[in-house]
Image (tube, rainbow, N blue to C red):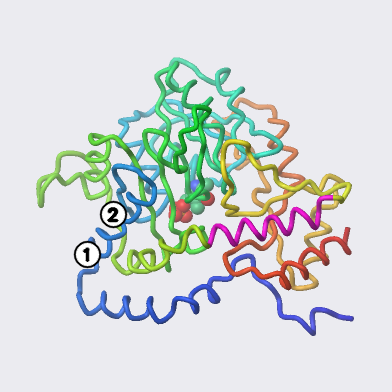
Amino acid sequence: MNTTTTTPPLQMVDLRTQYHRFKAEIDQQILDCIESTAYINGPAVKTLQAGLEAYLGVKHVIPCANGTDALQIAMMALDLKPGDEVIVPAFTYVATAEVIGLLGLHPVMVDVLPDTFNIDVAQIEAAITPRTKAIVPVHLFGQCADMEALLALAERHGLYVIEDNAQAIGADYTFSDGRVAKSGTMGHFGCTSFFPSKNLGCYGDGGALFTNDDALAAKARLIANHGQSRQYYHDAIGINSRLDSLQAVVLNVKLPHLDAFNATRRAAADFYDRAFAAHPHLITPARAHNSTHVFHQYTLRLSNGRRDALKATLAEQGIPAMIYYPVPLYKQLAYQPYWKGGELPVTEMLCQEVFSLPMHSELNESTLERITTAVLVAE
Ligand SMILES: *Cc1c(COP(=O)(O)O)cnc(C)c1O
C-alpha cells in the first residue's frame, strides 16, 4: 500500500486544529480588540500579565516582543558589560547565545547530559573565570535543568541565573525540601517565548520575562520601553519591545488551557515511549526526577547511525521529523570566535543521533499509531 496517496501528510505542530477549538472566542475577542483601538499595552496585556503572575506564582511578569528580546532585556537589566562571560549549554537554540554576542558579552559553552539534554551542572565550575557574571540554563525540550545544584553553584560564585524557559512553560520543579516552583521562576530572571509553535503560543511573535525581584522588574520594564520612566523621560538606553494587545488576546484565551495542552503532550510522549521501549537502537527521552516534562519536543536518539536515513524514509510517507539541533553552537560560523577549540562529546553525539517527532496539543491515538508504526517498520 502506498500510504502517501491514502493519508495526508502530518505536521510537526498542528496549529489549525487547536485554533478551530477556540475559534469563536478568539475571533470575537480579536474583533473587540481592533474596535477598542488599544493596540499597544491595552487591557489585554495587563490581563495576561496578571494571569501569568497567578499561574506561575511569580511576583512580576514583564511582557515583551519575543523570547530573544526577553533574554536581551534580562542581560541589560542585570547590567552585564562587554567582556563579561555568560555560561550557556552548547546544545541549544541559537537565541540563547545570540543576545550574549549582540551585547558584546562572551558566551562560554558547556556540555550537556546525554539523558535529559540539559546543561551538565557538574561541568559548569570548570568554566567559571573571574569574568563570569551569569549562567543561562535552558530548560530544553520541556523539562527543567538541575536547578537546585545550579542555583547553589551560582550563589557560591556570586553569579546571576537567567532561565531560558522558552520551551518549558508550565513545567514544575521540585526541590529536595519538597518546595515546588514553576520553570522560569527560580532564577534572577526567567525568559519565555510565545512564538506560535511554543507550548503557549500566540499568532505572531511574543515573549515575557519573569522575576520575583521588584528592582529588577522595574529595570526590565524601563528597558523594554525605550528606557522611559514616565512619558518622554528616558533614564536608560532601552529598546522597543512590547507585546501587541492582539497577541495578548490570543494568549488570554489559551492560558487557562495550558495545563491541558501540556497533559495531552505528556500523554503523546507516553505513547511514543511505550511504542519504542523495546527497540534496541531507539533511546527515548529521560524524565528528570525533579522536574515534570511539558514536551515542547519529543526528542529521541537513534544510536545505529541511521538517523538521517530514517528521517528521509518517514518524509516519503508524509511523516515529518526534525533535527533539533544538527550543529553544536561552537561549530556555527558566528560562534566559532568564542570557542577555544576541541569538541564537547555529548553535544557532538546528540547532534548526530537526535530527532524529534510530531508533538502538539492535538495529537490523537490514530495519528500516534501511524507515526510509531512507520518508525518501527523503517527501523
Ligand atoms: C524559541 C526560543 C527562543 C527565542 O524565542 P523567540 O520568541 O523566537 O525570539 C529562545 N530560546 C529557546 C530555547 C527557544 O526555543
- Name the outermost residue toward the front: 178
Whether ligand 1 has any atom under 8 Å from the Cβ at mark 2 is answered as no
Indicate left or right for 45 with 176 as reference. left
| Quadrant (top left, top right, bottom left, bottom right) of the N terminus | bottom right
Residue 50 image label: 2
Q: Quadrant of residue 358?
A: bottom right
Q: Quadrant of residue 127?
A: top right
Residue 62 percent coordinates (x, y)? 30, 49
Q: Quadrant of residue 335?
A: top right
Q: Mark 1 highlights which residue? A: 42
Q: What is the span of residues highlighted in magenta in the rendered image?
A: 261-277
Identify the secondary structure beneath mark 2: helix
Dot 2 amino acid type: Ala
- For the point 32% across and 69% down, which residue is it? 246
Q: Nearer the viewer, mark 2 or mark 1?
A: 2
- For the point 85% across and 52% down, which residue is it? 306
Residue 148 image label: none
Dot 1 amino acid type: Gly
Name the one closer to the observer, 13 or 90.
13
Indicate left or right for 44 with 283 as reference. left
Of callouts 2 and 1, the N-terminal one: 1
* Label 2 Cα crowd, 10 Å radius (few <14 / some 14-19 / many 20+): some
Name the one closer to the observer, 88 or 260.
260
Identify the secondary structure beneath mark 1: loop
- For the point 48% across and 64% down, which residue is it? 196
Q: Name the dominant secondary structure of the magenta segment.
A: helix
- From this view, report whether residue 14 is shown above or below residue 286: below
Q: CA distance from mark 2 to mark 1?
A: 13 Å
- For the point 57% across and 35% down, which residue is it? 89
Q: Is 59 inside the magenta-drawn segment?
A: no
Indicate left or right for 194 with 312 as reference. left
Residue 49 percent coordinates (x, y)? 29, 54
